[in-house]
Image: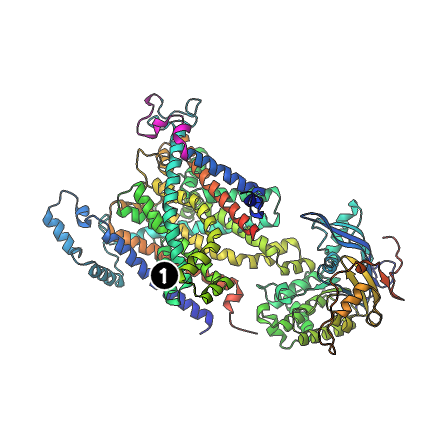
Amino acid sequence: MSPFLRALVNRLIASLVVLVGVSMLMFAIARIIPGDPARIALGPNATEAQVQALRRERHLDQPIPMQYWEYVRELAHGNLGNSLYSNRPVRVDVAQYLPATLELVFAAGLMMVLIGVPAGVLSARYRGRWGDHLGRLGSVMGVSTPAFVWGVILQLVFAYLWGVFPIEGRLTAALPPPPPITGFFAIDSILSGDMRTLADSLHHLVLPALALAMAGIGQTSRLTRASMVETYGKPFIEMAHAYGFRESRIAARYALRPALVPVLTILGLDIAALLGNAFLVESVFGWPGLSHYGVEVILHKDLDAIVGTVLIVAAAFVLANIAVDLLVAVVNPRIRLAGERA
Amino acid sequence: MTRLACSPAWRAFWRSPAAVAGLALVALVAACALFAEFIAPYPSHAGPIGDFAAMSARPSGQYPLGTDSIGRDLLTRIIFAYRLSLEMAVVVLAIAAPIGVVIGLLAGYLGPAWSYALMRVTDVFLAIPPLVLAMSITGFLEPSAIHGMMAITMMWWPWYARLAYNLTRAEKQEGYVLAAETVGASVPHILFREILPNCMPSILTKVTIDVGFVILIASSMSFLGLGAQAPTPDLGSMVADGARYMPDAWWLTVFPALAILIVVMGFNLLGDGLREAADAAR
Amino acid sequence: MPPASAAAGGEGDIVLAIRNLRVAFHGLGGLVEALRDVSLHVRRGEKVALVGESGSGKSTIARLVLGLLQDQGAQISGSALLRGREIAGGVERGLRARDAYIRAVRGDRVAMIFQDPVSALNPTFTVGDQFREVLRRRDPSLSSSKAAARARAALADVYLHEPDRVLGSYVFQLSGGMSQRVMIALALANDPELLVADEPGSSLDVTVQARTLHLMDDLIRRHRTAVLLISHNLGVVREFAERVYVIYRGRIVEHATVAQLFRDPLHPYTRALLAAIPKLDQAQAPDAPETSPDFSAPRIEHPGCSEPLQAAA
């Protein structure tokens, strides 16, 4: 097995260990925090007998390690427990809301790459000129503003004032959602050939994704610029100049590829971090994603749902990180071919 | 002090307009926090009672940034909110940074078993997106400023652990560490008297930038209702409250939002400036 | 064989002619002079060495010839004619034309070999990719297959076997000696008229360096390329060059053929340089003075070594 493959396997194992740790952590927090979940679920009017019955049913009267063991057993069967808030298995809730959040995150990630990287490249190529300074100021502002602020401002300007984009939601109320194949409205629309729904869902996607992506765009642009500037100082760029390569070609290809390597890692982490900030944007735009569900179950102290949601989000986060590392390995031959001498 | 003022790091700092701007913004915010009672035009509006004659008033000479739905001066509330923000950030970092750094130092210096164990624990906390972790912890408790602080602290220390871990692993190879080991210095001595001082510039730079980010996360949480509760003035909850009156009473959202931008940007620029100055010094 | 430099103006086969060149940079403390009144020339097929210690300004000359200096905000005065056209000084109006000319010519008619081949080649592109980029400088419409064929021929010229494997490799997969040969092959791929070699092989160990230099010598003779060899290593100079300029602190202090220089060094600085070479029959390296007021003695030219008279540019 090549050393690269071996490293990947190690990474997966470590990630598994980490996820187990996450489940333990969330579980411990959930069970240790004061308050009686059964009592909270049933409300103050329920009788003691009812509360006890619920406690027995949910194994809440057993010692914590036993409870954890029960939980893990259920988990192995793909069962994340039941939500007291929605009265459905958590798994079902997650399956319903997660795709909406993921669609938002992907769209924002795409924007980060397609806007942030070129902005950074241009900034580096014309460094010192006013465009560069403007870009850098914009980046700092982007990074310094929370996603919900961007959401509110974008909503104010583009939805309320100028009416270019819809104020909230994933689809116009009159339009039925596409058949749920992946849960991603855009993809499902394409798969079922419904162009109108596709256009409408994309239209609704723009503002929330942009609000979510703003900080990331700023960060990506700063990072790309810094990396490009550093790469421009390297000997192989001086050689490229000496050999008369065109400046635009150097910027777009010759310098960009080695410069992207450090950027990609952090870019990946940032995209994964979008999962957390999605909560804020979903709130502003009424986006029916995991966050709305998450906030509700938190306020209701719906323990199973909270633990399950966090576990899923953490798993997505970890997988995203691994995907990023794989991508980096593809772009950086040094990692891919480590240990192989010509 | 004069020697410090003439050092290359100091000069590099003052040469950068961004860094100086950051310092100015931070100074402004700090002044608000420290002297809120004296600077704010209507100190009593920081509480639950406002001027009922001027509810949701537009910005004017009397109320420069307008008033909220119960007639409280927005400028005053923002100034007091700055105090809360800075308090939170200071408390959080004063606890999270030392804990994280110590764990990172230990993980970086001690044997591979310790490294693996400590870093995996750190990874567990880092595997959960920051906001999600803080939110869930707060959610288990009653939402309040204190619980919010606790939650953010719990989620912040891993970043310092990771930073200290990477720094320690690099420093471990340096000559002065080998020298200390040969002389038979104790592990605490090596960690805290030898390695830690060399890591301080990076750590302090991170702390400075983090003040801004703690405030950002805290405002995000209070936006969702998981932070300071009414009537305490808090930037995030002010934006949330104001959002309900959009787009008519736009000042209720825009000004607190700008206030967040100012403080976070200030600390960001200041931290960047410090980092560049530290690099120049080397 | 490519034609003799028809574009070189009226001086026959002089490829590079530098006259009274002065280069100054804006440093922290003010203006710093890197080159003072430097004059030298290289003819077609000649191997000319520029010898000096680090900081003497020899790298500055290399970069000037490749046009890497002109947009760094340096103050340049004097003249440098490359193939008969001005690339250094020049009036305000002519600067655009000057820059355009150098940009048109470098990589094609003028090439440079860098000191450390491993860092001079892009780590994320294969050797084949980089050959393609360089070959397309000459002929932008070159197809990938033709470029690969030419690259293979170039690699065969430097005696690199298994050319396809080398073309598919990244630079970190090659040994130092192989990278240096790739560098030489790249430089000569477009058959340039002038080759500037900045400390070639100095990052390699001695035996590999010797082999590499022999190889370079062979190729250059075949192509009749003019070479400006920049080095601090007198041994390399002796083996490889025909004429030598000694540079000290931005000034040329001696100009001689290799035979003349080693047999009869006249300038005090040259003598100090030669004395500093440890000889096999000496117990230790002799004490050569680091600096001395004698080093500022004016330029000494040996018989037969003067700058050619030059018509105004």
Residue A314, visible in the rendered structure:
yes
Residue closest to the eye, C175 or B102 = B102
Q: Single out the residue that lies furthest toward the front.
A: B183
Vertical relation: C55 (above or below) B250: below
Q: Judge the density around disc 1: few (<14), some (14-19), many (≥20) Cα neighbours within 10 Å.
A: some
Q: Quadrant of residue C253?
A: bottom right
Q: Which residues are magenta?
A: B33-53
Count every numbered label the image shows and give the total.
1
Query: In this rendering, would B271 be left or right of B122?
Result: right
**Does B52 appear in magenta?**
yes
Residue A17 locus on image (x, y percent): 34, 63
Vertical relation: B151 (above or below) A312: above
Residue closest to the eye, C286 or B83 = C286
Residue C300 locus on image (x, y percent): 85, 62
Which residue position is annotated with label 1?
B118
Q: Single out the residue that lies furthest toward the bottom.
A: C281
Query: Which color scheme is applied?
Result: rainbow
**Does A84 appear in magenta?**
no
Circle 1 sits in a helix, a strand or a loop, which is it? helix
Q: Residue at x 26, y 48 (%)?
A: B140
**In the rendered view of the protein, which quadrant contains the N terminus of chain C?**
bottom right
Residue closest to the eye, C258 or A185 = C258
Residue type for callout 1: Leu
Residue B262 locus on image (x, y percent): 46, 38
Residue A168, visible in the rendered structure:
no
Q: Residue at x 44, y 36 (%)?
A: B29
**Mark 1 belongs to chain:** B
Residue C40 locus on image (x, y percent): 82, 60
